[in-house]
């Protein structure tokens, strides 16, 4: 029990030392040092001495959808971006990088992917993202846009590799959300927010398309035969019931003959064949 408590105290002490070291490092990273301040002072003196000419070099403008990350002797000034509007830079010690905050879209090239059930498909998509932290997009990654494009391709392969073909064809929205979450988590240290990911097209091999079409056609024919058989069964039951009714009332058959005759006459046929019951002729034959 004593050893466990001592180890816990040692871990807490080590964490405090690490936090203090990080704070000291952050404070030192924001300091220019004596030589750096001398260069800044000389630059200010130079700007004041040649003010009419250097004024155009010191004043910069960024638009509403842009931000400027200023580096002074290689260090980021104030740890925050400048803009929009006017800002000042020193010509000898400062340089800056403009960052566009608008939403950017790019197409994911078609990727040959092997699904979970060993089917090769070609899938492409589109990604919408924007930069929400200009400092991170400049300081933490060399090219945020190119890195996001490459990461989107690998993420598409990784996510679709865990899905079956049926899931890929029917659950595009779920796959898009899964890709968006994966990309958003991976690009968060780069200051990038992935807003939307969409699957554009899924291309199947020709042989697989023909096989799926044949399977769908066979299933449709099977359903059609089942429906036709059920209809015949219902029709036979109805005919059986009708025959029982006509057997109980013979005159009903004669009425059915007359109804059939009126139906045929309405179709404007030139020849009408109407069956005559033999029972009606027997009375004439007996008189003879």
Image: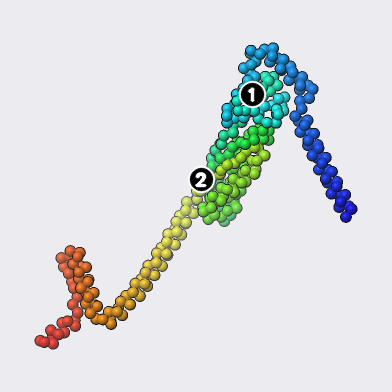
Q: Quadrant of the N terminus?
A: bottom right
In this view, which residue lies farthest toward the left? 288
For residue 12, above or below residue 220 = above
Q: Please state the horizontal and vertical placement of residue 278, each as a whole percent of the image.
A: 19, 81
Residue 27 falls left or right of residue 235 = right
Q: How many marks?
A: 2
Residue at coordinates 86% horizontally, 52% vertically from top-left?
4
Name the residue beneath numbered marker 1. 87
The residue positioned farthest toward the front in the image shown: 85
Q: Quadrant of the C terminus?
A: bottom left
For disc 2, the neighbor class at 10 Å (few under 14, some 14 to 19, many from 20) is few
Disc sitting over residue 200 in the figure: 2
Label 2 to label 1, Cα distance in Å? 43 Å
**In terms of secondary structure, where does tag 1 sit?**
strand
Q: Position of residue 223 (x, y in %)?
A: 42, 64
Q: Earlier in the sequence, mark 2 or mark 1?
A: 1
Whole-percent x and y of residue 159? 60, 49
Residue for point 47% across, 56% down: 212
Quadrant in the picture for residue 106: top right
Above or below, comparing residue 49 to residue 9 in the picture = above
**SS assignment at label 2:** strand
Instruction: Name the residue at 56% across, 36% down.
Output: 103
């Amino acid at each position: 029990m004593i050893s466990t408590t001592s180890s816990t105290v040692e871990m807490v002490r080590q964490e405090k030392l690490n936090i203090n070291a990080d704070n000291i490092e952050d404070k030192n990273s924001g300091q220019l040092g004596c030589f750096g301040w001398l260069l800044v002072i000389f630059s200010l003196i130079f700007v004041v001495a040649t003010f009419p000419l250097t004024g155009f070099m010191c004043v910069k403008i960024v638009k509403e959808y842009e931000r400027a990350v200023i580096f002074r002797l290689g260090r980021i000034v104030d740890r925050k971006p400048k803009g929009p509007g006017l800002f000042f830079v020193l010509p000898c010690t400062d340089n800056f990088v403009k960052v566009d905050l608008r939403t950017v879209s790019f197409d994911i090239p078609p990727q040959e992917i092997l699904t979970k059930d060993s089917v090769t498909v070609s899938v492409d998509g589109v990604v919408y993202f924007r930069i929400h932290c200009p400092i991170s997009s400049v300081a933490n990654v060399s090219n945020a846009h190119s890195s996001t494009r490459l990461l989107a391709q690998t993420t598409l392969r990784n996510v679709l590799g865990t899905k079956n073909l049926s899931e890929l064809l029917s659950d595009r929205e779920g796959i898009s959300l899964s890709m968006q979450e994966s990309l958003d988590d991976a690009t968060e240290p780069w200051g990038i927010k992935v807003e939307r990911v969409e699957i554009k097209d899924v291309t199947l091999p020709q042989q697989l398309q023909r096989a799926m079409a044949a399977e769908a056609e066979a299933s449709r024919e099977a359903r059609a035969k089942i429906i036709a058989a059920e209809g015949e069964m219902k029709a036979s039951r109805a005919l059986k019931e009708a025959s029982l009714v006509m057997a109980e009332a013979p005159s009903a058959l004669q009425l059915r003959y007359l109804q059939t005759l009126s139906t045929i006459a309405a179709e404007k046929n030139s020849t009408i064949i109407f069956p005559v019951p033999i029972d009606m002729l027997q009375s004439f034959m007996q008189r003879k």
